[in-house]
Amino acid sequence: MSKANLLDRRQVVSTLLANRKDVVAIGGLGASTNDMCAAGDHARNFYLWGGMGGAAMIGLGLALAQPKLPVLVITGDGEMLMGMGSLATIGLQKPANLSIAVLDNEAYGETGGQTSHTSAAADLVGVAKACGIADSRAVTTMAEVEAFAKAVHDVSAGPRFANVKIDSASLERILPTRDGTYILNRIRGDLGFQPI
Amino acid sequence: MHARADAADTVPNWPDDIFTTLQRFDVRQVPYVPDAGHSRLIRRVLDSSTMRGIALTTEEEGVALLAGAWAGGQRGVLLMQSSGVGNCINMLSLIPILRFPFLTLVTMRGEWGEFNPWQVPMGSTTQGVFELSGVQVLRAPHAAEVPAVLEAAASQAYNALTPTAVLLSQRLIGAKVFTK
């Protein structure tokens, strides 16, 4: 059930991406990828419609390939739980330009709202911290979201992780393109890479 | 014990052949889940100034990593053993959807004198799993064939975006010896 003081997911994501400049953003399977589209389509948006559990690792591969670019993964609690081991992999590599924001509504919103592990037991901030991501934040206010959005641009102080508690409201779906090849090649083109 | 029977008495140089080929193809990211058969290659990668070895907690992380690496302009190769192939299945769906170069080198267990029956089910289905997932399989049964197989695999994976797995046979790497 919706609790008081929980943040609105669309407001969180549009704040994270408001002054994005050269940020490459990866949206995890589910509502997160729609939120990214709702904030405005962009050539550097990597929308995922599958590969559940892979968002953070796609972010790692991109961050290691482009160490001067800020890379921001925006995903949900269920998607992050499925790829929890990747937090250990990221903690080991310590890419300074990688940031991960989890939109935590404590539920699998796309599949009927079944409660997730974060609703009662799992603490993703604790997991991220214990995996070696020292800058791991529990975010409950828009001021903290704004501070995190600013930190994303510092490509020398990551990796960083934020678990943002959001309300579980189901919003109108704003669907991005589903064409994976287009999505990937649009990013590559914007970064200056030619087709093979 | 991690000794292997049937491997040559001298240090095998096929892992060095693999390393040289990967270097020539400008491979930069090398995600891996450790395997004894890959240990020499992993050491070479970790000592390299141009490649980054990335230890994974599970093999599917490597598939997603290679998609991100390509978005950022880099080629990679995933090192794993046959039991890890099963862990990758759903993540392999990213390859035809996103069309990024995918090359994986798999050390085989569950064949050629395997002592551990628990390795056999996944070892027996490794090739089938790849083929059902749209990944072409090339096999390197003997050390002498490794350079040519690697060359073909890297060429088709990186130049033609043909998802490719090279299965390094248990005969090549030597069956794992269990001693009391």
Image (tube, coloured by chain):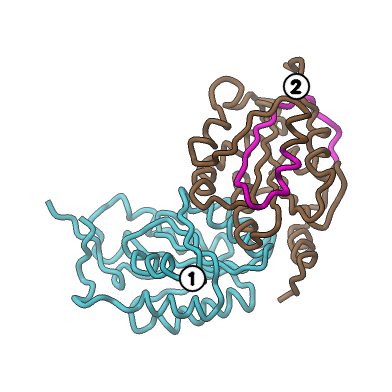
Per the image, the residue denoted by label 1 is: B49
Chain A colour as displayed: brown
- Using the image as rendered, state which of residue A141 and residue B56 is in the foreground: A141
Q: Judging from the image, what secondary structure is the residue with disc 1 in?
A: loop
Asked if the residue under mark 2 is in contact with the one under mark 1, i.e. CB atoms within 8 Å, the reply is no
Tell whether position A95 is magenta: no
Where in the figure is residue A68, as x and y percent of width and height?
68, 59
Q: Above or below — where is A120 with respect to A134?
A: above
Q: Above or below — where is A181 with respect to B61?
A: below
Q: Above or below — where is A109 with respect to A97?
A: above
* Main secondary structure of the magenta stretch: loop
**Can you say which quadrant of the picture contains the N terminus of chain B?**
bottom left
User: Left of B154 or right of it: where is B34?
Assistant: left
- Using the image as rendered, state which of residue B152 and residue A125 is in the foreground: A125
Residue most extreme to the left = B180
Magenta residues span A148-174
At label 2, which amino acid type do we have? Answer: Leu
Q: Residue at x 34, y 68 (%)?
A: B40
Where in the figure is residue A15, as x and y percent of width and height?
82, 38
Q: Residue at x 84, y 43 (%)?
A: A18
| Chain drawn in cyan | B
**Mark carried by residue A6:** 2
Q: Residues within 10 Å of mark 1 (few under 14, many from 20)?
A: few
Q: Judging from the image, what secondary structure is the residue with disc 2 in?
A: loop
At label 1, which amino acid type do we have? Answer: Ser
Q: Are marks 1 and 2 on the same chain?
A: no
Q: Above or below — where is A39 with respect to A181?
A: above
Q: Chain of mark 1?
A: B
Where in the figure is residue A43, as x and y percent of width and height?
82, 58
**Mark carried by residue B134:** none
User: Left of B110 or right of it: where is B74?
Assistant: right
Mark 1 or 2: in front is 1
